[in-house]
Image: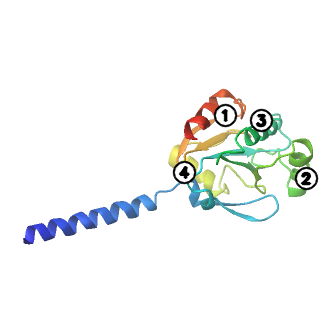
């Protein structure tokens, strides 16, 4: 009887420890951003939904990829895919003033998805999301328009360089598999 009680206690303790560790596993939903209008965006509100995160810049040769991101947003608008553009001047190709960024995003590309205020994506002042991507997955953007796709569990599924267009079949196939 005593052995049974000890076994039961150890089993319950192990279960409690494992469930606590699972809840504390870092994922994309542990982070927050500030949107282009200065509002806090709690990524935890997207828990259970796939997220495509792209570091962007308004004065880059890849800036026309905003059109592809908007195409994705439109194509998947009836799903729970969340698209987030993390604007950044880490590569010296983004405006400092969010109003200038909004002009590019809204006037030139009619963006409807979440767009952040400018953040750093590399170096000592990198936003915590990008530090986590580097530490957890050894993934950091080498340039603007790097793309990161996260599962419904908030875990990185895949990433693509600037050369891969957002609405490419490589990306849409991965998105389709998550949905």
Q: Give the position of the C terminus as an image quadrant.
A: top right
Circle 3 residues within 10 Å: few <14, some 14–19, many ≥20: some
x, y percent for residue 61:
83, 34
Q: Residue 58 vs residue 4: left or right?
A: right
Give the residue drawn at x 88%, y 48%. 106
Comparing labels 3 and 1, the label whose residue is closer to the camera: 3
Towards the viewer: 77 or 157: 77
Give the residue drawn at x 58%, y 54%. 28
Q: Secondary structure at mark 2?
A: helix
Residue position marked by numbered label 2 in the rendering: 100
Comparing labels 2 and 4, the label whose residue is closer to the camera: 4
Mark 2 vs mark 4: which is more N-terminal?
Answer: 2
Q: Which mark is residue 93?
A: none
Is disc 2 in contact with disc 3, using a CB cutoff of under 8 Å? Answer: no
x, y percent for residue 175:
61, 37
x, y percent for residue 160:
64, 34
Q: Give the position of the N terminus as an image quadrant.
A: bottom left
The answer to whether residue 97 is seen in the rendering is: no
Residue position marked by numbered label 1 in the rendering: 161
Q: Residue 134 vs residue 146: left or right?
A: left
Distance between the Cα atoms at labels 4 and 3?
23 Å
Give the residue drawn at x 89%, y 46%. 104
Residue position marked by numbered label 4 in the rendering: 154
Mark 1 vs mark 2: which is more N-terminal?
Answer: 2
Give the residue drawn at x 62%, y 51%. 130
| Quadrant in the rendering for residue 69 | top right
Towards the viewer: 136 or 64: 64
Mark 3 vs mark 1: which is more N-terminal?
Answer: 3
């Amino acid at each position: 009887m005593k052995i049974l009680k000890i076994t039961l206690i150890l089993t319950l303790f192990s279960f409690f420890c494992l469930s606590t560790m699972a809840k504390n596993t870092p994922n994309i939903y542990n982070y927050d951003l500030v949107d282009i209008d200065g509002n806090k965006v709690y990524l935890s509100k997207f828990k259970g939904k796939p997220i495509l995160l792209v570091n962007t810049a308004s004065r880059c040769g890849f800036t026309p990829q905003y059109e592809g991101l908007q195409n994705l947003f439109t194509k998947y608008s009836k799903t729970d895919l969340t698209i987030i553009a993390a604007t950044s001047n880490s590569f010296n190709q983004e405006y400092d003033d969010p109003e200038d960024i909004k002009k590019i995003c809204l006037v030139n590309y009619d963006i409807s998805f979440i767009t952040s205020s400018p953040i750093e994506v590399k170096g000592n002042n990198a936003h915590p999301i990008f530090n986590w991507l580097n530490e957890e997955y050894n993934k950091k953007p080498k340039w603007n328009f790097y793309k990161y796709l996260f599962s419904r569990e908030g875990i990185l599924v895949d990433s693509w360089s600037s050369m891969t267009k957002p609405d490419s079949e490589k990306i849409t196939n991965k998105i389709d598999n998550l949905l």
